[in-house]
Structure formats: structure tokens, C-alpha cells
Image (spheres, helix red, strand yellow):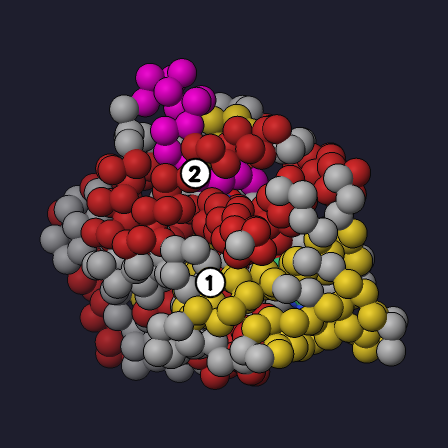
């Protein structure tokens, strides 16, 4: 068995792992960075477009008065003090410096307007990546020029300990098991959204109702490895719920742009009991939209009648596609605040029906049967909603009147199913503010550090609404983990 020797092993070359690996080489340490796939970056590159920061130079130059204190209080309030205040403060307080640090290491960002509709009146916090794929290349080149070693297509499998200290990492490369002897390991392999069994065990919804956009190679190896050496995994089970998606179980590659846009609009929604359940304009905040979909058991249906379909076919509608701003800000284009007309809406809906993502019926009774929801409940919900539309005011859930527009009266009727969607799992190994892995009795596991989606500490039951906070957590926790490891090695 071949053995490597180094001081620090970093597991996973995503946002957290890159933050850790570059920090450790900057401190003059020997570092081996392991990446399971043949490419670096993880969800921190293929998915993310930017990260949160507060009090950055760019924010100061733009005259922002939003402070670390404000962000800290907002976060603690959002999580009902279920997050760890020391970790939360450490991440937020470092976030501005990390913007400069990223810039110095090849990843430039630009402060842009918040990318979600309901965050427009809030302080600007989203630092959008510029040229991200080339930037990640620059960063990994920097790491290697500084003497760091990157092993791709190499998965960490087991953390070894000797006398209660981390002493090595077993890796699998080309089907062969090898060992890296080391004094510290920083585990940042992205959580476990890619592990169907682990996901199933921790979900409170049926796993077939969860649509994952997350990193498939994140299969919980890090959480398992650290649990094996005594780390506390009792807080595993938090998902980054994010919006809701229409997908086809029969044809996973199916996508229809009209149906995608319709899903991102606040028509009438009903749950599996046939009840309306929320002010549908929650779709303008992705975290809250994701959470309510999860709470409803993993999916809901949005309803359209033929009158609405005909309207949408022939008219422009002054509602905003909730994702428009996100996509337009990447292109630096202005938001139109309009959708439609959807000239092919009839055939688009038929395509959704054919792909098992929507249902069409001549009557509400027939629709209820097809959806397997109680018919009386569905009809009552629709009746009540139609009365709200007639009155022009939602006194049930207080949706802004602008969106109380389309009654559901005239068949054929359509129901399109929107599913719970996740960008990944967030949390697993309990840590302190130095990102040391903790045992159930709060002792640091000597030499073991955690970052990114693997680390518990800043979230409560769900993903906060602060834009870019999960990547901010990953980059900052990675940097902090490496600083702590270096401090320990220097003792
Ligand atoms: C579509 C999408 C869009 C997103 N947009 C944003 C956004 O705009 N802003 C934001 O803040 N957050 C966003 N996120 C979330 C953000 O990307 C993650 O929170 C962040 O990347 C987590 O960092 P990480 O280092 O924990 O995991 P990742 O960045 O996913 O990196 C984990 C890495 O570990 C590797 N790995 C897995 N197992 C092993 C193993 N055993 N050995 C070695 N390597 C291993 C994986 O291959 C991967 O490269 C988005 C996520 C998705 C999926």
C-alpha cells in the first residue's frame, strides 16, 4: 500500500475545501486536496453564482450602512437562537475579508442588486462571481504553484487516528486504497444530498417528492468518516429547501420553459388535501417558498382554468417570473416585470400532462379524482378562492391584490405539480467556532475540522433568506477551519 505524507488533508475541492486548502498553503503548510470527481469546484462552482458578505469594501463604497451587528441579529432572529452564536458571528465577521481574499486568489466578485424580488428593499449583500470557471482554475493553479497537491478522482474513505489524534486518511484512487499520513484533516465534501438512503432517512417527506439540484458526488462520506471517530452527527437532517420545481418522474430530462415560468408565478395553489395553504407570492422568496413546499409534504399543485389559459395565450401579464431577476442579473440585463404571451401554452400544458407533470380534466370532480385529493375539499377551496378574486382581496392568506386575479371557473381545468427542491443538505457534524469537529460531550476531536455543508452551526431547521449565505458559510468556514488547523500545527 502506497503512503503519502503531508501535514493537512482537505477532503473535497468545492467552496469550503478550496477556502481551506488555499489558506493552509498560504500559511506554509504541506497540503493535499482530495477531490472525488475529475473536476474541482463542487456545487460551489457549478451551482453557485455568488456569496453573501457584510461590510465589504464594495458595500462601503456603495454607501451601505448594513453592519455585521445587523446581520448577526437578523440571523439569530431567523434561527430563533437555535444556531450557534459564536459560529454565526465568526462567519459574518469574516465575510468582508473573504471577498478581498477571494479577489487576491483569483475569484473576483461584483456587488449586485439582490437577486430575489422581495429582497429589493433590503441591503445589498450578494457578491456575484465574475468569470467563475476561469476563476476556479486560477485558484487551483495558485494552490499548486504554492506547493499544494491536488488528487482528483480520489475519494477519502476513512479517517485514521492514533492516541486520539487524527493520523491519516485512507483514500481510494483507481480502485486502490492508499493512505495519506497527516496531522489534520479538514472535511468539506459537501454533505449527503447525493446519498439516497441517507436523504430518505432524514427527510420528513417521501424521498420521491424531493427534487435535488445538489452535488451528486456529495454522498455523506465525510459525515460517516467523522462519526466513526466519535464526532456528533445528531443534527444531521437540515435541507437547503429552495423554491419548487416541476419535473417528470417518467422523463427526468424533460423541461418546458412555459411550464417553468408558470410555476414561478403566484396562481392558485392547493396541497394534497385540496386546500389552498399560503399567499402564493411566497414564490418571490426562494427559501420561504422551498420551506412551505416541504411543509406541505413535498408538493402542491397550481391550478389554471381554460379562461386563464386563453388569457395567458394572448396577453402579456404584469407579473414577474420569480427567477427572472436571478437570470437577468447574471447577464446584467434589466428585469422586465412581465411574462407572456405564451403562444403555445395549450401544447405546453399537454406536454406536461403527457410527461406526468400535470393533469387535465373537464370538471373539478374529475380533476380531484386524477389528483387523488378529496373532491369536496378541492371544490370548496376553489369556490372560496373565486370569491376572493371577485372581491379583489385575499382575506384568507393576504396575497397582494395584484396577484388575486385569476379565478378557476371554466373547464377544462389544469393542475401542475410542483415538488420540493433542494440545493443540498446543510449540516451534519456539530462544530465550534474554530470549526473543530465536536463529540457528543462537546470535546474537539483532535485534528479533525469541518467546513461547508458538512458543518452544523449556523442553521436552524432550514436555509435562511439572506442571499448567498450558504456559499459564504462554505468559503468562510473553510478558511476558519484551516486557520485553526494551522494554529494547532504551529503549537
Ligand atoms: C444549483 C445550485 C445553486 C446554488 N447557488 C448558490 C448561490 O448562488 N449562492 C450560495 O451561497 N449558495 C448557492 N448554492 C449552495 C452552495 O453551492 C453550497 O452551499 C456550497 O457549494 C457548499 O460548499 P461545500 O464545500 O460544502 O460543497 P461543494 O461546493 O459541493 O463541494 C464538495 C466537493 O466534495 C467532493 N467530494 C464528495 N465526496 C468526496 C470524497 N469522499 N472525497 C473527496 N471529495 C469528495 C465533491 O465532488 C465536491 O467537489 C447553490 C447550490 C446549488 C446546487
Q: Secondary structure at mark 2?
A: helix
Q: Is residue 423 left or right of residue 195?
A: left
Quick one: 183 or 133, which is closer to the camera?
183
User: Pointer 2: what residue?
Assistant: 95
Residue 39 belongs to the span the image colors magenta: no
Q: Is residue 12 visible?
A: no
From what the image shows, is residue 59 above or below residue 372?
above
Q: Is residue 73 visible?
A: yes
**Which label number is shown at residue 436?**
1
Look at discs 1 and 2 and give the one toward the viewer. 1
Extent of the magenta region: 49-64
Residue 11, how many percent across, how many down? Answer: 65, 62
Q: Could you tell me which residue is drawn at 30 percent across and 77 percent down?
A: 273
Quick one: 84 or 304, which is closer to the camera?
84
Q: Could you tell me which residue is drawn at 28 percent across and 49 percent down?
A: 75
Callout 1 touching callout 2 (CB < 8 Å) = no
Image mark count:
2
Q: Is residue 145 left or right of residue 43?
A: right
Q: Quadrant of the N terminus?
A: bottom right
Amino acid at each position: 500500500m502506497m503512503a503519502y505524507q503531508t501535514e493537512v488533508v482537505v477532503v473535497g475541492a468545492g467552496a469550503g475545501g478550496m477556502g481551506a486548502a488555499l489558506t493552509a498553503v498560504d500559511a506554509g503548510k504541506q497540503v493535499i486536496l482530495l477531490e472525488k470527481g475529475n473536476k474541482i469546484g463542487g456545487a460551489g462552482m457549478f451551482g453557485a453564482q455568488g456569496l453573501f458578505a457584510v461590510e465589504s469594501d464594495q458595500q462601503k463604497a456603495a454607501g451601505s450602512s448594513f453592519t455585521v451587528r445587523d446581520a448577526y441579529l437578523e440571523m439569530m432572529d431567523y434561527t430563533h437562537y437555535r444556531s450557534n452564536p459564536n459560529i454565526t458571528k465568526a462567519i459574518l465577521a469574516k465575510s468582508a475579508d473573504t471577498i478581498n481574499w477571494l479577489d487576491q486568489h483569483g475569484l473576483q466578485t461584483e456587488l449586485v442588486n439582490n437577486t430575489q424580488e422581495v429582497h429589493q428593499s433590503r441591503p445589498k449583500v450578494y457578491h456575484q462571481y465574475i468569470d467563475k470557471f476561469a476563476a476556479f482554475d486560477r485558484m487551483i493553479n495558485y494552490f499548486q504553484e504554492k506547493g499544494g497537491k491536488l488528487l482528483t478522482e480520489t475519494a477519502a474513505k476513512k479517517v485514521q487516528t492514533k492516541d486520539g489524534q487524527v493520523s491519516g486518511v485512507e483514500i481510494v484512487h483507481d480502485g486502490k486504497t492508499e493512505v495519506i499520513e497527516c496531522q489534520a484533516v479538514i472535511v468539506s465534501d459537501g454533505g449527503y444530498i447525493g446519498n439516497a438512503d441517507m436523504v430518505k432517512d432524514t427527510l420528513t417527506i417521501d424521498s420521491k417528492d424531493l427534487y435535488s439540484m445538489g452535488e451528486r458526488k456529495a454522498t455523506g462520506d465525510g459525515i460517516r468518516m467523522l462519526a466513526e471517530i466519535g464526532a456528533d452527527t445528531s443534527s444531521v437532517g437540515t435541507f437547503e429547501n429552495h423554491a419548487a420545481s416541476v419535473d417528470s418522474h417518467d422523463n427526468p430530462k424533460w423541461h418546458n420553459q412555459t411550464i417553468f415560468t408558470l410555476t414561478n408565478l403566484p396562481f392558485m395553489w392547493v396541497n394534497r388535501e385540496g386546500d389552498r395553504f399560503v399567499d402564493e407570492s411566497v414564490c418571490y422568496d426562494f427559501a420561504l417558498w422551498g420551506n412551505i413546499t416541504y411543509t406541505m409534504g413535498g408538493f402542491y399543485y397550481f391550478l389554471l382554468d381554460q379562461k386563464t389559459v386563453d388569457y395567458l395565450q394572448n396577453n402579456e401579464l404584469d407579473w414577474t417570473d420569480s427567477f427572472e431577476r436571478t437570470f437577468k442579473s447574471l447577464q446584467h440585463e434589466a428585469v422586465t416585470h412581465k411574462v407572456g404571451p405564451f403562444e403555445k401554452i395549450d401544447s405546453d400544458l399537454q406536454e406536461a400532462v403527457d410527461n406526468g407533470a400535470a393533469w387535465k380534466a373537464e370538471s373539478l370532480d374529475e380533476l380531484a379524482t386524477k389528483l387523488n385529493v378529496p373532491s369536496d375539499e378541492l371544490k370548496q377551496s376553489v369556490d372560496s378562492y373565486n370569491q376572493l378574486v371577485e372581491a379583489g382581496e385575499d382575506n384568507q392568506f393576504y396575497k397582494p391584490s395584484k396577484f388575486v386575479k385569476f379565478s378557476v371557473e371554466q373547464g377544462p381545468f389544469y393542475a401542475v405539480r410542483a415538488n420540493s427542491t433542494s440545493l443540498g443538505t446543510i449540516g451534519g457534524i456539530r462544530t465550534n467556532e474554530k470549526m473543530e469537529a465536536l463529540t457528543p460531550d462537546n470535546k474537539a476531536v483532535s485534528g479533525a475540522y469541518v467546513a461547508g455543508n458538512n458543518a452544523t452551526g449556523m442553521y436552524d431547521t432550514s436555509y435562511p433568506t439572506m442571499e448567498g449565505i450558504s456559499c459564504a458559510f462554505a468559503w468562510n468556514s473553510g478558511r476558519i477551519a484551516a486557520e485553526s488547523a494551522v494554529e494547532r500545527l504551529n503549537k
